[in-house]
Image (tube, grey):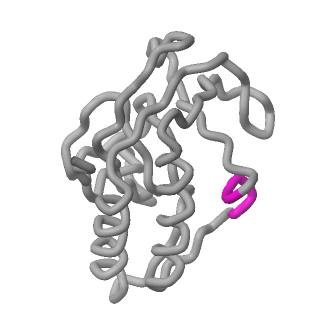
Amino acid sequence: MVCHMLEEVPEDYQFSIWPPHLTIVPWFSVKEEALLNTLLAIEETARKVGSFAIKAKEKAWYGPRNDVLVTEVEDTTGRLLKLHHSLLQSIQSNGGTILDLTYTDENYSPHVTLTEGSGGLQQDQIQSCSSITVVEKKQREMEDKQVVEVISLV
């Protein structure tokens, strides 16, 4: 998956509980032999679009059981939506498969997912987003997610 982390995390960072983050592209799979090309395509595409800003709106409950607290956000520069669409296309044209397209394209609803104890963003707060993070799932490990790459957008 591709996201923007509200708090800086290093490459190879492993975690089981998500830090506050903005999902840009949901989970996708890619064959091992296509991984490097896909990562290069993500980096090239993201840098072409550049940094973006979001403005916090209201808190809401998301998820199939309405049990995930989020802060809905507004794409103040128009670049977040462009990045979302461009990355979807780039990943798919480089051999990646988006695992669930339900909340993509016109159904993409930008939001920051919050975790217990995290403040996240306050309503009307503007957050500059100058990096994106590629995260992979690590099955069979306690820390089941890992940062693959942090890409600067500036």
Looking at the image, which residue is at 20% across and 50% down? 11
State whether residue 41 is above or below residue 27: below
State whether residue 63 is above or below residue 148: above
Residue 85 at what x, y percent from top left?
A: 56, 62
Left/right placement of residue 97 relative to residue 63 reads left
State whether residue 127 is above or below residue 141: above
Left/right placement of residue 7 relative to residue 145 reads left
Residue 57 at what x, y percent from top left?
A: 62, 19
Left/right placement of residue 148 relative to residue 64 reads left
Looking at the image, which residue is at 25% across and 54% down? 151
Observer-nearest residue: 104 or 45?
A: 45
Number of numbered discs visible in the structure rendering? 0
**Residue with the most extreme right position:** 65
State whether residue 89 is above or below residue 66: below
Magenta stretch prevailing secondary structure: loop
Left/right placement of residue 46 relative to residue 72 reads left
Res 14 quadrant in image: top left
Res 16 quadrant in image: top left
**Residue with the most extreme bottom position:** 33
Question: Is 103 part of what is drawn in magenta?
Answer: yes
Looking at the image, which residue is at 44% across and 57% down? 137
Residue 78 at what x, y percent from top left?
A: 52, 44
Observer-nearest residue: 109 or 65?
A: 109
Q: Magenta span covers which residues?
A: 101-105
Residue 134 at what x, y percent from top left?
A: 36, 56
Question: Is 119 part of what is drawn in magenta?
Answer: no
Looking at the image, which residue is at 30% across and 69% down? 44
